[in-house]
Image (cartoon, helix red, strand yellow):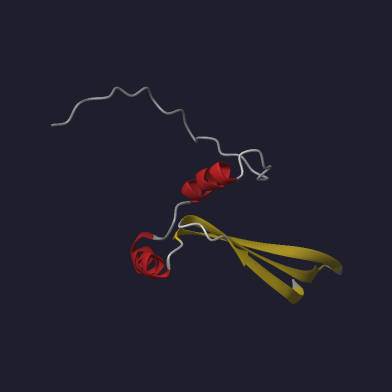
Amino acid sequence: MSGVSDAYSVKTRDAKANLQLTVARATKDGRSVFLLDSDMDENGRLILHRFDVIRHAFNGGTHPIDISESLRVMFPSAALGYGLAPKRPVPETRPRLVS
């Protein structure tokens, strides 16, 4: 990958699960390609986002499945380019009341 240029970012203004997309032009194997970096913040408000940054240093950040579910809510009919499938079937669960 070489010649990365013309980067442009957009960010939604949502209070929760705001989405940031950054697109750049590059060259790979002599062909012109586009690179996409997507990021989702749990909190779109600056002070809450800063606390998230600190918390993510310990827990690894927002889980990819949470991001996928948020994208599906925001863009219900969009082709995301991937699908999620469980590694093994989830067993039947029975609710219980915890007092």
Q: Residue furthest left?
A: 99
Find residue 69 and report its horizontal and vertical position in percent: 51, 43
Q: Quadrant of residue 81?
A: top right
Give the quarter of the figure containing the C terminus. top left
Q: Quadrant of residue 32?
A: bottom right
Find residue 55 and report its horizontal and vertical position in percent: 34, 64
Q: Nearer the viewer, residue 2 or 37?
A: 37
Q: Nearer the viewer, residue 91 or 74?
A: 74
Q: Nearer the viewer, residue 44 or 66?
A: 44
Left or right side of 30 for 86: left
Find residue 91 and report its horizontal and vertical position in percent: 39, 25
Residue found at x 54% / y 42%: 73
Q: Quadrant of residue 4?
A: bottom right
Residue found at x 65% / y 68%: 9
Q: Nearer the viewer, residue 42 or 44?
A: 44
Left or right side of 44 for 32: right
Find residue 41 and report its horizontal and vertical position in percent: 48, 60
Residue found at x 19% / y 26%: 97
Is 67 above or below relative to 85? below
Is 12 above or below relative to 69? below
Give the quarter of the figure containing the N terminus. bottom right
Is 92 above or below relative to 35? above
Is 84 above or below relative to 92? below
